[in-house]
């Protein structure tokens, strides 16, 4: 399980009049077997934060360290769009991100495909799969490298509600089974409440507005009143920081 | 792999100099582009001039200076405007007919039966080299004026049909239905929706078509005319007067390039500015 | 073989004969019949107005017997049809190979570097707009008879198209896939092998297709003016001999040849290279635009409809050749016809 430390993180885009502050003075620590959700409306910087944590972008100022037992940590990623190589089979897509192509690695990849119920689809091309299946391949790919920390950027936002629901359940059980650190970005408060034990609320302008604990037991049922109350509380936070104001 | 990221914590640099730095960088890039562009001209023109004297005999490959001088002579002798006028007239008439025919076929192809009917005609039209039509019409019609015109029409119509048909197929039914539901009449619907939608397709067809038409016209003139650019080219090459030959083709080619790029593209930019970077 | 009627609802015609007569296939068959009719009528009309023009306007039977003779291998020309097309194809192949190599190198350079692009761009545009007639005449004067003139013409006609397509390929690199690879720490070599090169394939394929189609047209013109054999020279042979049936017959062979190659060779290759594509497989071919989408595509579309955004990378690469239409120097409008 990994340790993520963020200190005085600041990120800007553009210059002069076009300058946009994406993240403003963010400080946080995440560690252990935890599922952390980052929620906020569009433009609050949550995707930027994830890009910086995953190394795709560099901060303007500040420090980010992600370690596992004091060494740089391995990370896995699930993107909003599956980002599969369309010209390679599903299995080849998983192998693409592995460190080697040995028999053991192949077997491991096959195991993760089975975990997302795509064990028999190894030889198919992404174009032959539905959007939901492609996303599952993306999830299997991220888990198959057995990383210390998993970053997920709104992975279910492009899927229909029914598929998303079943994928959330799958993700839940995989997280329980593999005991990773997961950082999960979403705009859907309900999703965050259902999946995570800690919620970071971001406001427009890249400010971290709140850090909410979610100690309710897993698995959580949408019809459970405690869950509804928790959800309402998160929304109240939004109201307080004016994030719900229509701009 | 996530790595430890740690840029040295500094204070914000004063905003002024950062803006300046960005602007300076952009300016430098623009100058670089211009310099390389000029270098390209110098390189290729120089290569041509070099090849003319050294690599191939001057008689076979006149250099840019020779060609330029010859153009001066030809212009002075008065031959140039006449030949240009002849060729342009042919292009104009031929292209106009091709446009009408091509548009008509494009519209007719919306009907399924007629689609099947014209389908092979369009395929043949697109794949057949203009040379073939030029030869066939030359052999059948000899020197009569409608031979070249038919060849131009046959070579050009297909691409126009394709563009028109594509434009009509892509008509935004949802916008038209929306207008109908608000009770907007046919004339206004056509003016506000159909025509602006079709315009880029038709314009693309015109650009494509014109480009093809002028080349085919010159080609037909080589075989079956007694006037025009193509004819002058044939005469010059038969008499082995390379500088003249090159002069004719380059002069017309520069002119056609001018028409294509400057005139048509300017019109396109002004009328279709709203398209942004969406393709036609 | 009849098209699926997906959009309009009509009362189905009463009997099979009527249904066939109204189908697009019937229209397709009707076309050559109508052409034949027009041809025969024109012959009659011309004969009555200009009796002396009879020699020049051939009868359909003359053309057909000429073509049949050629197919059997008997000909009055120095070489028969198979030798002729063989020679031309050989030249086309060599010219295409050279054009692909030169074009890819320059195209890559232009796509990757703004300076290189500035250096070459105006000249690529210039060569693109040059009619192949000019190259053909020049090459025939410069290189005389033989193989070199036609081959050089093919190269000159094809190179600008290859350059533009490869440049487009570089510009359309799927950045999200690169980011994904980098995020997972995939090695540079692997990224080049598994991301860069496959993403360029549709563009290289389009380049090859253009090089073939346009190279063929340029080759023919070059052979007309400066050859002593080959398809272009042979058609000129019949033209000089004032045998209209020879010219028309050979012209029909040209069309058939070009169509065969387009449909079979490129279609096959396209199906193999792009078997991972979810849509209709072949790269851009004109006539396919008029086909109703086959049922497989319609159902595939329905499945992915709700999840279109998840197919971002797919679409970006699938779009391939279409993206060249966005740029100012659209290659297709410069083809000579």
Image: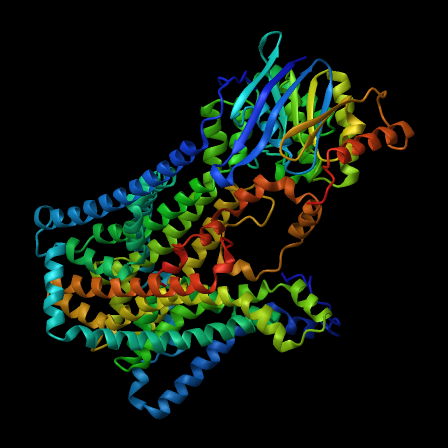
Residue A26 placement, left or right of B213: right
User: Which residue does the image show at 38% across and 54% down from the upper left?
Assistant: C329
In this image, C325 relative to B55: left or right? right
Q: Is residue A77 above or below residue B279?
A: above
Q: Is residue C47 left or right of residue B5?
A: left
Q: Quadrant of residue A90?
A: top right
Name which residue lies at 69% across and 72% down.
C19
Mark yes or no: residue C276 visible.
Answer: no
Where in the figure is residue B14, as x and y percent of width and height? 45, 29
x%, y% of residue A88? 56, 33
- Say whether residue B96 is visible: yes
At horizontal 67% and vertical 49% (from top left) the residue drawn is: C301
Instruction: Work out which quarter of the rendered image holds the N terminus of chain B and state it.
Output: top right
Measured from the top left, where is residue A162 in percent x and y? 79, 39
Q: Nearer the viewer, residue B132 or A235?
A: A235
Asked which quadrant contains residue A163, the reply is: top right
Residue C194, given in percent of the width and then of the height, sits at 50, 30
**Seen in the image, is C185 located left or right of residue C243?**
right
Residue B13, quarter of picture = top left
């Amino acid at each position: 399980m990994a340790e993520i430390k963020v200190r005085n993180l600041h990120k800007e885009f553009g210059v002069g009049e076009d300058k946009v502050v994406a993240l403003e003075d963010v400080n946080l620590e995440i560690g252990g077997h935890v599922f952390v959700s980052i929620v906020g409306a569009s433009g609050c910087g949550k995707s930027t934060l994830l890009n910086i944590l995953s190394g795709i972008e560099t901060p303007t100022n500040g420090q980010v360290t992600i370690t596992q037992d004091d060494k740089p940590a391995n990370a896995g990623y699930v993107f909003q769009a599956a980002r599969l190589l369309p010209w390679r089979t599903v299995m080849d897509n998983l192998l693409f991100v592995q460190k080697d192509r040995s028999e053991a690695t192949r077997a491991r990849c096959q195991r993760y495909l089975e975990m997302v119920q795509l064990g028999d689809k190894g030889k198919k091309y992404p174009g032959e799969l539905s959007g939901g299946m492609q996303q599952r391949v993306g999830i299997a790919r991220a888990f198959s490298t057995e990383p210390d920390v998993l970053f997920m950027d709104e992975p279910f936002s492009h899927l229909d509600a029914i598929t998303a629901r079943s994928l959330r359940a799958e993700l839940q059980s995989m997280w329980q089974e593999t005991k990773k650190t997961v950082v999960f970005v979403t705009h859907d408060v309900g999703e965050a409440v259902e999946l995570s034990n800690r919620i970071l609320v971001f406001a427009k302008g890249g400010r971290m507005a709140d850090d909410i604990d979610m100690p309710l037991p897993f698995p959580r049922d949408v019809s459970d009143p405690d869950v509804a109350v928790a959800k309402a509380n998160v929304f109240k936070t939004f109201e307080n920081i004016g994030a719900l104001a229509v701009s | 792999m996530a790595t430890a990221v740690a840029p040295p914590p500094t204070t914000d640099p004063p905003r002024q100099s950062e803006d300046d730095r960005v602007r300076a960088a952009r300016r430098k890039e623009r100058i670089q582009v211009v310099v390389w562009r000029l270098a390209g001209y110098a390189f290729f023109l120089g290569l041509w001039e070099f090849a003319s004297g050294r690599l191939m005999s001057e008689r076979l490959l006149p250099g840019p200076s020779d060609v330029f001088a010859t153009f001066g002579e030809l212009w002075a002798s008065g031959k140039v405007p006449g030949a240009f006028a002849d060729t342009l007239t042919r292009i104009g008439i031929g292209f106009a007919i091709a446009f009408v025919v091509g548009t008509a076929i494009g519209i007719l192809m919306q009907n399924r039966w007629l689609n099947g009917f014209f389908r092979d005609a369009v395929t043949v039209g697109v794949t057949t080299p203009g040379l073939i039509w030029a030869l066939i019409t030359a052999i059948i019609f000899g020197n009569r004026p409608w031979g070249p015109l038919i060849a131009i029409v046959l070579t050009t119509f297909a691409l126009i049909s394709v563009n028109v048909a594509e434009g009509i197929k892509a008509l935004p039914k949802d916008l038209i239905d929306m207008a109908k539901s608000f009770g907007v009449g046919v004339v206004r619907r056509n003016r506000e929706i159909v025509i602006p939608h079709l315009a880029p397709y038709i314009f693309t067809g015109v650009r494509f078509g014109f480009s093809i038409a002028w080349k085919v016209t010159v080609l037909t003139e080589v075989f079956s005319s007694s006037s025009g650019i193509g004819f002058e080219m044939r005469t010059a090459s038969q008499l082995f007067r390379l500088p003249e030959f090159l002069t004719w083709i380059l002069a017309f080619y520069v002119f056609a390039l001018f028409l294509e790029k400057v005139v048509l593209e300017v019109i396109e930019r002004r009328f279709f500015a709203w398209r942004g970077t969406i393709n036609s | 073989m009849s098209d699926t009627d997906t959009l309009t609802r009509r009362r189905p015609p009463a009997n099979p004969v009527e249904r066939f007569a109204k189908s697009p296939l019937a229209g397709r068959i009707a076309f050559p019949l109508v052409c034949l009719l027009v041809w025969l009528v024109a012959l009659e009309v011309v004969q009555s107005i200009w009796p002396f023009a009879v020699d020049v306007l051939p009868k359909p039977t003359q053309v057909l017997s000429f073509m049949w003779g050629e197919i059997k291998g008997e000909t009055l020309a120095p070489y028969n049809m198979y030798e002729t097309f063989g020679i031309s194809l050989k030249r086309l192949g060599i010219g295409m190979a050279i054009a692909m190599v030169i074009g890819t190198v320059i195209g890559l350079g232009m796509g990757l570097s703004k300076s290189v692009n500035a250096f070459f761009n105006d000249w690529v545009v210039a060569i693109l707009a040059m009619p192949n007639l000019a190259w053909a005449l020049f090459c025939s004067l410069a290189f005389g008879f033989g193989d070199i003139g036609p081959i050089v013409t093919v190269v000159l006609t094809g190179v600008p198209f290859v350059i533009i397509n490869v440049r487009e390929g570089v510009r359309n690199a799927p950045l999200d896939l690169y980011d994904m690879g980098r995020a997972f720490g995939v090695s540079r070599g692997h990224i080049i092998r598994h991301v860069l090169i496959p993403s360029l394939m549709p563009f290289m394929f389009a380049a090859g297709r253009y090089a073939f189609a346009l190279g063929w047209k340029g080759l023919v013109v070059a052979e007309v003016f400066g050859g002593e054999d080959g398809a272009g020279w042979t058609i000129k042979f019949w033209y000089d001999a004032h045998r209209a049936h020879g010219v028309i017959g050979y012209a029909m062979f040209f069309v058939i040849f070009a169509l065969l190659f387009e449909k079979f060779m490129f279609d096959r290759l396209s199906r193999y290279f792009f078997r991972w594509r979810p849509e209709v497989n072949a790269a851009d071919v004109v006539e396919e635009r008029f086909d109703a989408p086959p049922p497989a595509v319609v159902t595939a579309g329905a499945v992915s409809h709700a999840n279109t955004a998840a197919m971002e990378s797919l679409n970006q690469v699938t779009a391939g050749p279409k993206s060249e239409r966005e740029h100012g120097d659209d290659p297709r409008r410069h083809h000579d016809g």
